[in-house]
Amino acid sequence: MTPPIRKLLVANRGEIAVRIIRTCAELGIDTVAVHSAADRDSPAVRMAGESIQIGPSPAKRSYLYIPAVIEAARATGADAIHPGYGFLSENPDFAEVCEAEGFVFVGAPAAVMARLGDKSTARALMAEAGLPLLPGSRDPVETVDEARDLAGDIGYPVILKAVAGGGGRGMRVVRDPSEFAAAWQQTRAGATAVFGDGRLYIERYLEPARHVEAQILADTHGCVVHVGLRDCSLQRRHQKLVEEAPAPGLPAELAERIGAAAVRGARAAGYVGAGTVEFLLDADGNFYFMEVNCRLQVEHPVTEMITGIDLVAEQLRIAAGERLTVPPGGLPRGVAIECRVNAEDPGREFAPAPGTLTECVLPGGQFTRVDTHISAGYSIPPNYDSLLAKVIVWGPDRATAIARMRRALAETRIRGAGVATTAEFLHDVLDHPRFRAATHDTALIGSLTAPVGAPA
């Protein structure tokens, strides 16, 4: 049995660092916040029991620099490390180093993370477990000629995906054979630059499609459950903006089959910890495996709101070797919606819009939760993700949840010279007839923001 966690180092920043520290405070676990030079005055630093600077502002020299994180854990006497999401959260080398140095890694085992982080290996594993896949390559495609021939067999449109990709990056849709060679070169070059791995695979691009995911929990004693489905179909450039639980408009039988498939896939992978199995659904109700995220998701609060389960607390208990006590499917009640308020300008194709905040008024009121790290005077650093706040609401039914979210977004005022956010745009999106009717798909945001004369 792994000994209880006494002191946890949070290897992250922003709202997720704050969120982890809060749960640790409730569980009586001491915390250490690591920070870059840009984040020395952040809320996580103020809230943690200890803090230590691990490098300058660039992430590559701080939050992504493994030796600095490990040395900080040693220096502060931490016995466990939580990677949050992003940064090192899905880096199997980091998980392996943590384990080798004697630290409890709060996440999936390194070998499992490596297996599922390689998208071609993950597809093969899930196919063996009986999960449905979109037509595509089982292994990385070596040459552009081989890939083009395969695309012709699959049928256009197709999507090129980086084997090491994730988080909506490393993907490119190809709609016409004449575009294929250029798209191949661009995607391969981008994957090499971002992930250090230029290998690509190819599959049919499903449109229209819904993006639905299952939240799974798995302990070290062989128990694997899912605690509900989320819909994440409102996206820009394959990156989520609005998430909802439970996924609306799904027949109960279909939801049960998706959840069962997620559990089956997690078991086949030997999964341990909290994770998410993601699927695409077509208009006929068929679902297809997309990927496994071996970490806590940005959108985890909507699952917490409808089940009452603290997913970070469950991660910590699993990492300490405890058995799961949550029931399969959770205890769902009502509807929860999350909107990501990013420092981006929807009127300029979601271009980053950083600056210093002169005004920061965040919503409150009944059944409203805000996960954030910002306040008036905060300078949005250009070095990191653009997420400023997650606004989450709960309602007994979907109509009430939508009304509460629109009210909450209308209350939100985040302003500063050069600063733009997604709050007002998402307020309007939630009133779109297709969202109201739960018939929206992954193309809706793009159709609303496409330049005049451009294909939607």
Image: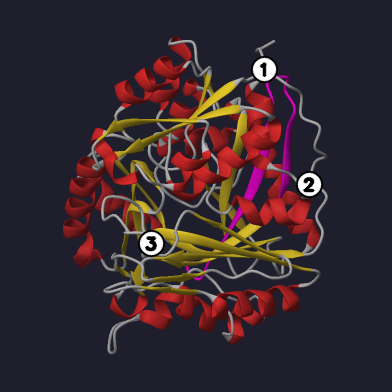
Picture quarter with the N terminus? top right
Location of residue 380 (image quadrant) = bottom left
Q: Decide: marks 1, 2 in contact (CB < 8 A)? A: no
Residue 418, above or below 51: below
The magenta region covers 207-229
Amino acid of disc 1: Pro
Q: Which residue is mark 2?
A: 329
Say which element carries label 2: loop
Query: Does 354 appear above or below 346?
Result: above
Q: Amino acid at mark 2?
A: Gly
Q: Which residue lies under the disc numbered 3?
A: 155
What residue is pinned by disc 1? 4
Which residue shows up at 31% across the image and 74% down it?
349
Of residue 57 and residue 203, the one placed in the foreground of this image is 57
Number of numbered markers: 3
Q: Quadrant of residue 75?
A: top left
Element on which disc 1 rests: loop
Q: Residues within 10 Å of mark 1 (few under 14, many from 20)?
A: some
Name which residue type carries label 3. Answer: Gly
